[in-house]
Image: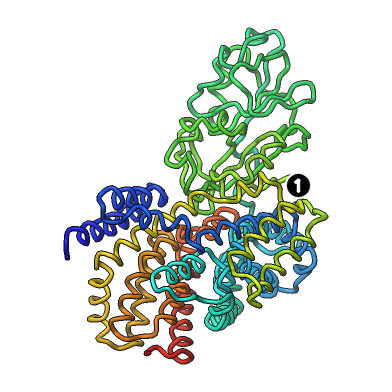
Amino acid sequence: MEWQGLLSLGLAVGALAVLIFTRIAAHLVMMGVLVILSVSGVLEVNEAFAGFSNHGVLTVAAMFVVAAGIHGSGGVDLLVTHVLGNPRSTRLAQMRIAFPVALLSAFLNNTPVVATMIPAVRSWAKRIDVAPSKLMIPLSYAAILGGTLTLIGTSTNLVVNGQYQELTGNTGFSLFSITVVGLPVVVVGMLFMYFVFPKSLPDRREKGLFGNLREFTLEVAVASDGPLVGRTVEEAGLRNLKRIYLVEIERQGAIVPAVSSEELLQAGDRLVFAGNTEAISDLLRIKGIVPSTDGELTLASERRERRLVEAVISPHSHCINQTVRDSHFRERYGAAVLAVARNGERVPGNLGTTKLKPGDTLLLEARPAFVSRQKYNKDFLLVSDLGTEPPRHQRAYLSWMILVAIVLSAALGLLSMLNAALLGAAAMMVTGCCSAQQAQKSLDPTVLLTIAASFALGNAMYKTGVAQWLAEGLLTIGMGHPLLILVLTYLAVWMLTESITNNAAAILMVPVVLEMTQKASLNPEPFMLVVMMAASASFSTPLGYQTNLMVYGPGGYRFTDFIKAGLPMSLLVGVTTVTVLAVGWPLAL
């Protein structure tokens, strides 16, 4: 192996180590690798940036817009209204969610499907008296399983197909090629959920994530004849308190939410603080602050000027590993953090010094516009308005017709997958199913950059002989036996997927697997399918897949809940995938 190969191998190992052991975002890591490969001359410029024009990546981008159209038009809400109903048991409730979600995820990106379903499922769970913790993991797992049903079910499938076409020159897979494997996996996964999940999933519904507002908010008043009247919040010494901070002011029946430092205090103002409620004694020592005489909790009452909102922190958020105070949350988002929940429980203690982590659920107090403004913000995986029902829009049926047209035109060979997706995305915007702004925000730049940049490392491994060297190692371990090699391929991709992003794992393994099949005279198609399936089998941790992280907080789960439910599911999906491919597909050429 020459220096180019050693550099490519070193970059691959280094990228994996950085992704596994640090919080550096995957797109930054992969873009860094791309720059090094291009500048060093290992890849020509057109080779380094080939991923940005790859058909698979462009199709992923177009399908993001299509999903935004279904989401924005209320298409998923339409399905919820007609399908969920009133099941007689927890088991039937789980299936009422799982089947339609799996069907939706077969044709749409999983993230908007789950994002739309979470508030609807929570409201429905309350109505049918079933704990949300019994329904949220089935929601996420059904979306993951459904993504294996078609080529457009997940971005990973499209990316693997795109790289397969680029490296081999083959025509690639059709829309329903993966269904031969995906359908048995979905059936087995559904049966597992039906028989195991009703008893194995926890029942956590005593008082929800945040319980009683009195547990973490406190109220005082500004004395009418005190020295604080006419002074700003900062001048009164109420901005930089250690254990609590000012959330809102009730003034003459109106609410001033997300209070600024320059807000002038008036006589009789009721001040609502969040944080450590034991700090009430410290607060009352301030001259001009008196106990609130009204027994009713201000924050618990319905007000037009205020929304109570739950938001789940994304792995890409600017606030990760920063305290609530240091992140300048109020100034950045125009909302005040009332409480933080992690691992299914509210984080006690000093709110201002709580470091935010991916998957944390925040209870926010904000103005009504916050929900619409932040719904597509990449800092949050999910924003749920606790005071309103999801809207129903008049273009819901039209959005479904556009999706059906995309699927039929691609399935019947009338259009290529890319052209069908591009026309569908355009139709969603032209017909008003989603606005241009919604379409733009749906194009997740971190996902697209990660995918496109990862192609450079895959190409370098293939070009420099690293893929050949790794393939020879796998062949040696597999002793040349096709079935054993298939099992090893699944395990390698699955373990990478649980450690780094599913797209990056798949792209790194595709050139290795192709080289291996060529050396052993094996049929590459079943091995490409096993890469797709293994890259989607991310059930074991909440951090392994985005939809798992989205339901982590709203379901009130702990980390171990995913291990208990997801590890058997991952193994079952693996056994089913390998069995179907070994029996129904010729492994050797």
Would residue 277 be seen by someone viewing this image from the given angle?
A: no
Q: Quadrant of residue 145?
A: bottom right
- Image coordinates of residue 386 in percent, x first then y, are 70, 46
Q: Name the quadrant of the C terminus.
A: bottom left
Q: Is residue 484 above or below residue 422?
A: below
Would residue 73 be seen by someone viewing this image from the given angle?
A: yes
Q: Quadrant of residue 457?
A: bottom left
Q: Name the quadrant of the N terminus.
A: bottom left
Please name the residue shown 56% across and 53% down the image: 553
- Image coordinates of residue 276 in percent, x first then y, are 53, 33
In front of the other: 17 or 283: 17
State the count of labels.
1
SS at mark 1 in the image: loop
Please name the residue shown 48% across and 34% down the image: 350
**What type is the residue that disc 1 sits on?**
Thr
In the rendered view, does 251 fall on the left or right side of 22? right
Q: Quadrant of residue 251?
A: top right
Q: Is residue 76 above or below residue 353?
A: below
Q: Residues within 10 Å of mark 1 (few under 14, many from 20)?
A: few
In the rendered view, does 315 fall on the left or right side of 460? right
Q: Residue furthest left?
A: 2
- Image coordinates of residue 302 in percent, x first then y, are 77, 37
Which colour style is shown?
rainbow
- Image coordinates of residue 329 in percent, x first then y, are 54, 33
In the rendered view, does 508 fall on the left or right side of 579? left
In front of the other: 311 or 45: 45
Which residue position is annotated with label 1?
Answer: 388
